[in-house]
Image: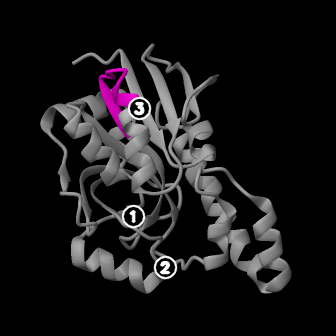
Amino acid sequence: MKLHKIAIVTAMEQEAHAVCPAPQLEENSAFPILRGTLKNNVSYRCVVSGIGIKRAAEATKLLCTQKPDLILSVGVSGGLAPGLSAGTIVAGTSILSDIEEFESWLEGAAEAQMRSGLIPDCGKTQCGKLFTARKPVLSAQDKLFIHERTGALAVDMESIAVASTAQKMGIPFGCIRAISDDSNRGIPKESLAGVDESGKTQLGPILKAIAKRPGLIFELIPMGRDYSKALKALGEIFG
C-alpha cells in the first residue's frame, strides 16, 4: 500500500520537533499539532499528546478523524534489554502491558510492510516486543524484572493506548522508539519534574531539585547526553 498521509503521536514536545521536518503549527486544537511533508512526499500530522495512556488515547482519536493511512507512536523509551545503548532505534512488533484495560497488540504483515517502506533504515533497527507501563520505570532492577518477565526491549507510557485506539478505529499502526536510558541506568525521581503533563519541558523544578540536592546534577548530565542521542536518532528515522 502506498502511503499518502500518516499521523504521529509523541508524548513530549521535544520528541515532536525532533522527528518532524519543517513543521507548521496548527491552530485551535485541543492538543498541539504539527504538520508538514516528509522527503518521500508523504504528508504528516503530529500531535503532542502529553504523558500517559489517557492523553495518548484522546490524541489518537483526534488524529483518527482525518483517516490517515498509518498512525505511529514515536518517542524516547527506557531500555529494558541489556546491550541496547542510548540512541538505538527500536521498532515494535508487539506491545505488551500490565494495564488491565488494554490487550496486547501484535503487528500485522501489512502494518510491518508499511512501517518498513516508510522508514528507509528500518532494517538496521532492533525489532521486537515493547512494554507500556502505567508509571515511570525508574530503577535498573525494575527494568531487568520487566525484561525477564516479558522479553520486552524497551518501555514507555503511551504506545499501547495509541495502538488500541488506532485498532478500534480501523487505522493501521506502528511504533518506533529511541532508547534514551539503557537498562543499567537508574532514573532519579527528581528528573520527572522536568516534563509537565502536557509534554512541555520545565527547567524551574529541576533547578529547585538541584538546589536541594546538588549531587543530582552529576546524575542529570549523563542522562541529558543520552537523551540528546535519542532525540538525534529520532530525527533520522525518516531519512
Q: Of 1 and 60, which appears nearest the observer? A: 60
Q: Which quadrant of the view contains residue 48? A: top right
In the image, 112: left or right of 3? left
Query: Where does the image place residue 77, in percent across and percent down from the top left?
Result: 46, 59
Disc 1 crowd, CA 10 A, few/some/many (<14, 14-19, 20+): many
Query: Where does the image place residue 118, in percent across and percent down from the top left?
Result: 35, 28
Q: Name which of mark 1 and mark 2 comes first in the sequence.
A: 1
Could you tell me if residue 22 is visible in this image?
no
Q: Identify the residue position indicated by label 1 in the image.
A: 155
Which color scheme did the rendering employ for the protein?
A: one colour
| Callout 3 amino acid | Leu
From the viewer's perspective, is the residue at label 1 or at label 2 nearer?
1
- Helix, strand or loop status at disc 3: helix
**Marks 3 and 1, how far apart at CA:** 24 Å
Q: Identify the residue position indicated by label 3 in the image.
A: 62
**Magenta includes 18?**
no
Residue span colored magenta: 62-72
Q: Which quadrant of the view contains residue 168? A: top left
